[in-house]
């Protein structure tokens, strides 16, 4: 960790992939408690069905936290200047989340790089994969 | 809001990157009048999806800090003839020294099944 230097990073470099899950119902219950996000949509299948969903689905912020781990496994947390994501599809319960990133820009003046980040949910039961979060992070490098 | 206490002789523990979002959720649980934007606007949680989330960092947050959150509604707009409504808010997290630590930008999508019919 923290060995990443500005001069040794190139546009097109990929961050080491970070794989999390499968996301069990227990993980969702624990994340609800830990995060303070008690929306029953993520923990109560009866509630989810009432609102037209076939089952509970994972908190978007759980996958964003996994993406944070992708970044903090690459650089120190304090090197993250700013980042944002768009939640493009839901992460079904029991899915495996695959986080990846690629350097897309180098700013020599600020000694910062932009990293395109992405999370995908692999649903083994349905044998399909979908992009769930896409975004960008600005990272300061020594 | 008070973060958990700092133990003597222990290095201050920095909050993880997405912790500002958790502070926001906890502040809603404190039931401060007007703190829960979705409640104030009469939004049903069953119709809410998280659309976008951003963080800007200015100073680290540590265990033991006392923080103040200020939420502003930045934008409200709709798509598909009101079938989807978007609420954009900004939350600033300021520590006990008055320093801005984190700024969050949050977009939620409210599905409005009535409008689709």
Image (cartoon, coloured by chain):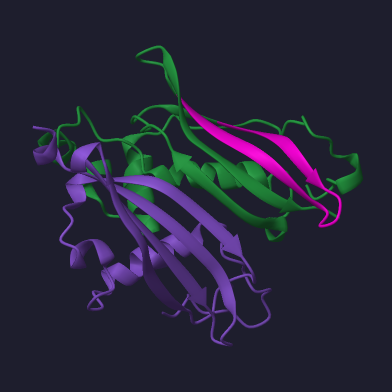
Chain colours: A green, B purple
Q: Is residue A49 above or below residue A71?
A: above
The extreme top residue here reads A127
Q: Quadrant of the C terminus of chain B?
A: top left
Q: Residue B33, image x and y in percent?
A: 22, 78
Residue at 75% x, 40% y: name it: A105
The range drawn in magenta is A99-121
Q: Does the magenta segment cover residue A119?
A: yes
Q: Classify residue B11 by image quadrant.
A: bottom right
Q: Which is more toward the observer, B92 or B67?
A: B92
Q: Quadrant of residue A114?
A: top right
In terms of depth relative to the viewer, which is nearer, A26 or A131?
A131
**Magenta stretch, main secondary structure class:** strand
Q: What residue appears at the point 54 percent right and 58 percent down from the top-left corner?
A: B55
Residue A43 visible in the snapshot: no
Left or right: A73 as drawn, with respect to A10:
left
B24 in relation to A88, above or below: below
């Amino acid at each position: 960790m923290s060995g990443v230097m500005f001069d040794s990073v190139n546009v097109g470099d990929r961050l080491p992939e970070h794989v999390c899950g499968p996301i069990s119902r227990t993980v969702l219950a624990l994340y609800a408690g830990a995060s303070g996000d008690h929306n029953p949509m993520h923990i109560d299948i009866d509630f989810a069905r009432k609102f037209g969903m076939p089952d509970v689905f994972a908190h978007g912020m759980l996958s964003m936290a996994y993406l944070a781990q992708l970044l903090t496994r690459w650089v120190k947390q304090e090197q993250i200047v700013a980042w944002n994501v768009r939640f493009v599809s839901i992460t079904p319960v029991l899915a495996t989340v695959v986080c990846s990133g690629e350097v897309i820009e180098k700013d020599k003046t600020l000694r910062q790089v932009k990293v395109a980040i992405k999370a995908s949910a692999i649903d083994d039961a349905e044998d399909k994969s979908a992009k769930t979060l896409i975004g960008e992070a600005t990272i300061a490098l020594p | 809001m008070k973060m958990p206490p700092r133990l003597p002789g222990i290095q201050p523990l920095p909050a993880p990157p997405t912790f500002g979002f958790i502070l926001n959720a906890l502040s809603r649980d404190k039931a401060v009048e007007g703190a829960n934007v979705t409640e104030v606007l009469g939004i049903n949680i069953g119709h809410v999806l998280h659309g976008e989330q951003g963080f800007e960092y200015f100073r680290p947050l540590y265990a033991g800090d006392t923080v103040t959150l200020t939420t502003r509604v930045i934008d409200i707009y709709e798509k598909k003839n009101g079938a989807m409504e978007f609420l954009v808010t900004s939350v600033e997290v300021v520590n006990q020294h008055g320093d801005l630590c984190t700024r969050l930008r949050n977009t939620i999508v409210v599905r409005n099944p009535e409008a689709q019919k």
